[in-house]
Image (cartoon, helix red, strand yellow):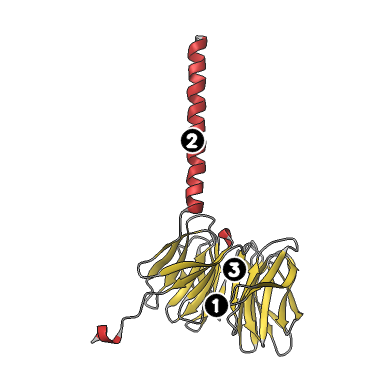
């Protein structure tokens, strides 16, 4: 091939390669910065920014908000944000603090960064309750605290008894079980890799409640249905399974959303860990009495 043609071919190949790289980078940039989209009637706003790896949320009676910052290697912490926006680190030197749940006049938190205790924080004191490996989801009710480990093939779903400190292993051999919640009387847990939500059953078969999901993680249940966040880096969704079983995508184009909780005022708070922020979600306005007449 003549030298001139070789140079031209090289330039064309370089241009094509450069164009592909630019297009790929542009696609990922678009996915990262494309604004979150809400379903018709729902409104979403940014409530707090610069909350590194926001994971679990726990609103307090005084209007403040506890947020776990899921950083590894002792860099994680639990942050308190007041109603006025002031911030204070309550507990630091944690490894991927993930789940949080109100319990016994305080709150329990887990750590997903390897072997670590599930602990109770109350009146400024932290008390280890029991050890787990990569514990994420927590659920507290009555005399029992449930915890699930996010592990590959050897995760456990455990039940801690507040009365005597005994821990029962209800399930073992789980893979990427992350979220826990009680819904319609059933204790539900997610299987992230399988895209499923299962219900704990006495016969040990744990039927599938929802399937066909993309990396489901945190769960929340209320009168509006079962809420599921998908822990995807790009184009993640916040889903709602209505009481009648139909599915709605309430938010889309999220980046690694984590826990969703009620804000106590009829709306919801969502931790969007991939963008280091907390979102506020408002439901459609209820029809007025005059409109119904």
Q: Residues within 10 Å of mark 2 (few under 14, many from 20)?
A: few
- Residue on which disc 3 sits: 178
Q: Judging from the image, what secondary structure is the residue with disc 2 in?
A: helix
Residue placed under numbered mark 1 in the picture: 181
The answer to whether the residue labelled 2 contacts the one labelled 3, judged by CB atoms less than 8 Å apart, is: no
**Residue in view at x 59 percent, y 68 percent:** 178
- Mark 3 → mark 1, Cα distance in angstroms: 11 Å
Camera-near label (2 vs 3) is 2
Residue 118 place in picture, x, y as percent:
71, 75
Check the image and report above or below for 113 versus 16.
below
> Is the residue marked by circle 1 packed among few (<14), some (14-19), or many (20+) residues within 10 Å?
many
Looking at this rendering, what residue extends furthest in the top direction?
2
Residue placed under numbered mark 2 in the picture: 20
> Can you say which quadrant of the picture contains the C terminus?
bottom left
Left or right, 46 with reference to 81: left
Classify 252 as above or below 245: above
The local secondary structure at tag 1 comes to strand
The residue under the point 44% across, 64% down is 251
């Amino acid at each position: 091939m003549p030298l001139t043609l070789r140079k031209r071919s090289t330039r064309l190949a370089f241009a094509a390669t450069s164009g592909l790289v630019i297009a790929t980078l542009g696609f990922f940039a678009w996915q990262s910065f494309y604004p979150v989209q809400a379903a018709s009637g729902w409104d979403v706003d940014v409530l707090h920014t610069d909350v590194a790896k926001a994971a679990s949320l726990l609103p307090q009676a005084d209007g403040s908000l506890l947020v776990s910052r899921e950083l590894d290697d002792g860099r994680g912490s639990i942050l308190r944000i007041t109603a006025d926006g002031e911030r204070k680190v309550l507990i630091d030197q944690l490894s991927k603090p993930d789940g949080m749940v109100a319990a016994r006049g305080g709150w329990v938190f887990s750590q997903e960064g390897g072997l670590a205790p599930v602990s109770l924080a109350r009146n400024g004191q932290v008390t280890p309750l029991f050890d787990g490996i990569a514990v994420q989801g927590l659920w507290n009710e009555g005399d029992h605290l449930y915890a699930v480990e996010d592990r590959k093939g050897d995760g456990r779903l455990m039940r801690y008894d507040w009365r005597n400190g005994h821990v029962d292993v209800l399930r073992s051999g789980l893979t990427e079980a992350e979220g826990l919640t009680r819904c319609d009387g059933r204790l539900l847990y997610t299987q992230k890799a399988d895209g499923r939500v299962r219900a704990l059953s006495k016969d040990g078969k744990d039927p599938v409640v929802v399937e066909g999901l993309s990396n489901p993680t945190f769960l929340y249940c209320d009168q509006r249905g079962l809420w599921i966040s998908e822990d995807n880096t790009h184009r993640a969704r916040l889903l709602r399974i209505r009481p009648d079983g139909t599915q709605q995508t309430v938010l889309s184009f999220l980046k690694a959303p984590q826990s969703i909780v009620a804000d106590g005022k009829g709306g919801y708070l969502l931790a969007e860990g991939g963008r280091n922020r907390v979102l506020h979600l408002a439901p459609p306005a209820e029809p007025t009495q005059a409109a119904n007449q």
